Image: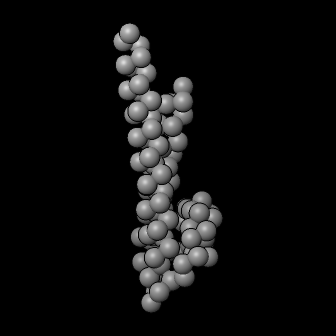
Amino acid sequence: MLELVLRSLATFLGIYGALLIIRVLLTWFPSVDWSNPAFSTLSQITDPYLNLFRSVIPPLGGLDFSAMLAIFLLFFVQDQLESVARVLATSYMSASAF
């Protein structure tokens, strides 16, 4: 059961990470209309997490390094969750073999 929860959470983080990458890539296009409902929704979903890092690491020379750190940390946590889920699955399989 815990394995399923961890894998589900890791999947959610992977999807959220993809949204973060899309959000960051879209900032490179000045013609993006952030008042558009799709872009506005994307911004509302991703900005709270990104703002946690922006308050610590300000942009340098127009580059937002805080977004890179935020994405790296998110994927690191996702990887750790998947690793723990794999260990749980392996230990469950070896325990049920006896």
Relative image position of residue 16 (x, y in whole percent): 50, 53
Side of 30 relative to 41 (left or right): left
51 over 6 or under it: above or below: below
Q: Identify the residue shown where x is 50% and y is 65%.
A: 70
Quadrant position of residue 96: top left
Residue most extreme to the top:
98
Picture colour scheme: one colour
Query: Above or below — where is 80 with respect to 53?
Result: above
Q: Residue 41 location, x and y as percent?
A: 60, 61
Which percent across, then down, holds residue 24? 46, 70
The extreme bottom residue here reads 61
Residue 11 horizontal/vertical position (percent): 46, 43
Q: Is residue 29 visible?
A: no
Residue found at x 37% / y 19%: 94
Q: Residue at x 43, y 55 (%)?
A: 75
Q: Is residue 9 visible?
A: yes
- Residue 77 vs residue 40: left or right? left
Q: Quadrant of the N terminus?
A: top right
Residue 86 in the figure: left or right of residue 56: left
